[in-house]
Image: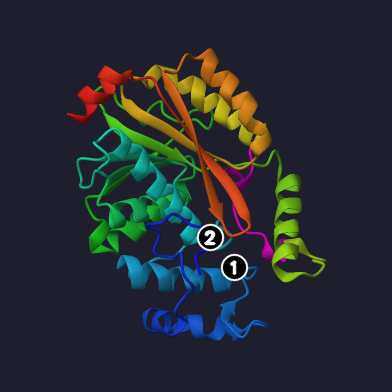
Amino acid sequence: MSKGLHKRNIHNIDYDFNALFKSEQSLKEYVFTNKYNNLSIDFSNPKAVISLNKALLSHFYHIKNWSIPNDYLCPPIPGRADYIHYIADLLAKGNNNKVPKGKEVLGIDIGVGANAIYSILGSTIYNWNFVASDIDKISIENVNKIINSNTVLQDKIKCKIQNDKNLMFDSIIEKDDRFDFTMCNPPFHKSQKEALKGSTRKVQNLTKSIVKDPTLNFQGQSGELWCNGGEMLFIKKMIKESVKFKDNCLWFTTLVSKKENLDNIYKVLKFVKVFEHQTIDMNQGNKKTRIVAWTFQDKNQQENWRK
């Protein structure tokens, strides 16, 4: 059965755990038969999710050495792959409906995190190249470790540290750079307290039980899960900063977790006079989220970019 993911997402059907065991033996200890008589894992257990990610990355994407530091965000791979596929569709619309592949396609992964999931998926699925940036030095060190440990990633991902937490593109994009897209999964909570409540709610939805100590299931650093002003302020800053680099990038994109933020985002996009913007809905099981994309390039400029 389809999980509601993008039509090209290879994770649209149930996991074949017996096949995944061959790629990651540690996964066996976390798999059990659920009440529907299907094999599954406890998705509220970070260790189980990390083990599943290792198996998926190895089995489907030939990433044999992947790990993250303790207490760093461990993302669900199927949903992350959807973002990559929808960016591919966005680029295809300006390329005679053909998804562009190969190292000529260059993207920026803003806030790559320690896991580097977006850069890994984009480079292995479509053979794109990435500049991966983050304000956290431990994250950048870990991404470089992942790159150096996997031949398929070498020369495809270049890491850059962002030394100013209030900036996204400045010092990452150079004067003569040309990027086909940027992508970002913003920290959507305003504080650690709000993030902890969100984590508690998420775990309770997964386990259908009351969580007395949510810190046990709390994964992610401040820059990954929360920032002053939350998602809305972060995206507002991103849009305003993108004006400075309107000639360096074809499409700027970001995930928007909270639907109620869309109207304010549209107002900011209108204020900075983007040529075009799109909202792309994504369905991941019961979870609904969306990508907002914008460009300053008019139709002639977009055509010249494609050529």
Which residue in the structure is indicated by mark 1? 46
Mark 2, residues whose alpha carbon is within 10 Å: few (<14), some, or many (≥20)? many
Tag 2: residue type? Answer: Cys
The answer to which quarter of the image holds residue 94 is: top left
The answer to which quarter of the image holds residue 98 is: top left
The answer to which quarter of the image holds residue 125 is: bottom left
Query: In the depicted view, which residue is nearer to us: 255 or 68?
Result: 255
Q: Are dots 2 and 1 in contact, CB under 8 Å?
A: yes
Q: Magenta part of the protein: which range? A: 215-228
Q: Does 227 lie within the magenta span?
A: yes
When the figure is inspected, residue 295 is found, relative to residue 47, above or below; the finding is above
Mark 1, residues whose alpha carbon is within 10 Å: few (<14), some, or many (≥20)? many
When the figure is inspected, residue 274 is found, relative to residue 55, above or below; the finding is above
If you read the primary sequence from the N terminus, does the residue marked by circle 2 or circle 1 appear first? Answer: 1
Q: In what quadrant of the picture does the C terminus appear?
A: top left
Tag 1: residue type? Answer: Pro
Where in the figure is residue 166, as x and y percent of width and height? 54, 28
When the figure is inspected, residue 104 is found, relative to residue 154, above or below; the finding is above
Where in the figure is residue 140, as x and y percent of width and height? 41, 48
Q: Does 220 lie within the magenta span?
A: yes
Q: In the visual, does 87 lie left or right of 27?
A: left
Applied colour scheme:
rainbow
